[in-house]
Image (tube, rainbow, N blue to C red):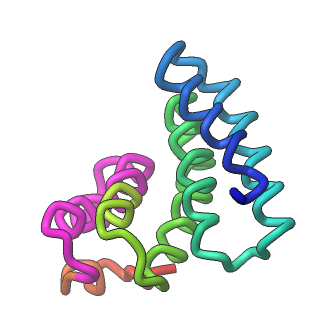
Amino acid sequence: HEPPGVVERRLGVVDRARADDHQQALAYCQRALTLDQASSGPDDPDLAYDLVCVGEARLGLDDRAGAQLVLERALALREASSGDAGELARTRFDVARALGPTARARALATAATMGQVALPELKRYNYSGA
C-alpha cells in the first residue's frame, strides 16, 4: 500500500516532464504534500519527495523564493535521515538553483557532486543543515 500522496506526486512529475505545465504540476505536488503530511506527520523523511516535487515546480514557475523555502525543508529532512545519496544530491542541486549565484549555492553544488554529507565550505557559509 502506497502513501496517500504518491499518485498526486507522480502526476505532478509527469505533467512537468510532458507538457512543461509547472502550474498543474505544482497543484498535484502540493496535494501530495498535504495528504502525506496529514498521514505521516511533518517530520517524516519521505515528505522530502513531495517537497522536492513542489520546489521543482516552483523553480519551473520562476518562483525561486518559494522553491527555496520548501527545498530547504526537504534538504533538512534528507540530511537528518540515512536515505538515498542520489536524492540528497538532487535536493542539494535544487537548493543551489533556488539560491542563485551565491557562495552557499556553489558549496551545495560541490557537496552534491562529491556525494558527501557535509563539506567544510558549508559551515563556512553559515550552513546549518536546516
Residue drawn 19% across and 86% down?
120
Residue 42 position by quadrant? bottom right
Residue at horizontal 79 percent and vertical 44 percent from the top: 31
Q: Residue at x 24, y 59 (%)?
A: 109
Query: Which residue occupies 58% across, 38% down?
Result: 58
* Whether residue 130 is situated above or below residue 17 in the rendered picture: below
Secondary structure mostly seen in magenta is helix
Residue 98 belongs to magenta span = yes
Of residues 96 and 30, the one nearer the viewer is 30
* Count of numbered tags: 0
* Residue situated furthest right in the rendering: 38
Note whether 75 is above or below 65 in the view shown: below
Q: Nearer the viewer, residue 29 or 3?
A: 3
Decide which of 56, 4 is in the foreground and name it: 4
Quarter of the picture containing the N terminus is bottom right
Q: Is residue 1 magenta?
A: no
Q: Where does the magenta region start and end?
A: 92-118
Tell whether 81 sits left or right of 49. Answer: left
Q: Position of residue 37 (x, y in %)?
A: 78, 65
Extreme residue toward the left, this view:
114
Query: Residue 35's spot in the image, x, y percent?
Result: 82, 55
Instruction: Check the image and report above or below for 18 versus 73.
Output: above
